[in-house]
Amino acid sequence: MNKKTDLRIIRSKNSIKKAFVELLNEKGYEAITIQDIADKAMINRNTFYLHYQNKPDLLNLCMDELLEEVKNTLALCPGSNRPLSASKLERIMQAVLEKMIGNLPFYKAMLGDENRIHGFQSKMEEIIKNTVNKGLDNTPLDISKELLLQYVASAFMGIVVWWVRNDLSYTPEEIASQFGKILTQGHFKAAGIAIDE
């Protein structure tokens, strides 16, 4: 009997999350009510409140699950415990993008233009910064470490956001490869633009 109850709880939670993500993309966070979620998930309001305190609680739990998934993906990424390199950054980006495809509707809700959830992007950027920072341990630098971390994480997230908003117009491998070239060669050289010195 306990397993049956557990399965019902899992199904209810999955149904609520799925309905929530669909509503985020349809009408935006502010316009969603608990009743909207309950109706779309085909449950009653009491069932919602059995699992979540309120709408912000649901949002935070959904975001935490996705961010934890990103952290786990990065931890499992080949070479994650080795020093930073262009190929490592490419592998990191490709792994994150491939993982994102599995939850694309949620990422569209979090990072899309109109209904974007503020805070999610900066939390994801912080995970990227921490990952890059681990690869820089004991590496002598000619520029500010904080500036470098911010640059790489901002560039990474800028590309991720652009990719999501443009309906995955390139494969994760293509994006990761171009990202690696931009980082290692600089913007203009990677684009084939000669710069007079």
Image: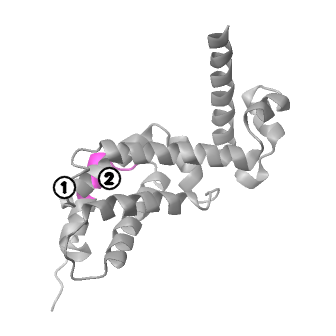
Which SS class for mark 2?
Answer: helix
The main secondary structure of the magenta stretch is helix
Image x and y of residue 105, in percent: 55, 42
Q: In which quadrant is the N terminus drawn? A: top right
Magenta stretch encompasses residue 12: no
Residue 3: percent from the left, percent from the top? 62, 12
Badge count: 2
139 or 113: nearer the eye? 139
Position of 40 with respect to 180 (left or right) is right
Q: Which amino acid does label 2 sit on?
A: Met
In the rendered image, which residue does mark 1 sit on? 87
The one nearer the camera, 148 or 35, is 148
Q: Where is residue 116 in the image (x, y as percent from the top left)?
A: 61, 57
Q: Which mark is residue 93?
A: 2
In the image, what residue type sits under mark 1? Ser
Identity of the residue drawn at 21% across and 69% down:
138
- In primary-sequence order, the first of circles 1 and 2 is 1
Q: In which quarter of the image is the C terminus?
A: bottom left
Residue depicted at 30% across the width and 51% down the height = 92
77 relative position to 154: left or right: left
Range of residues picked out in magenta: 168-178
188, 2: nearer the viewer: 2
Depicted 1 relative to depicted 96: above or below: above
Q: Distance between the residues labelled 1 and 2?
A: 10 Å
Res 171 seen here = no
| 126 w.r.t. 74: above or below | below
Q: How crowded is mark 2: few (under 14 residues within 10 Å), some or many (20 or more)?
A: many
Residue at 43%, 57% (x, y): give it.
Answer: 127
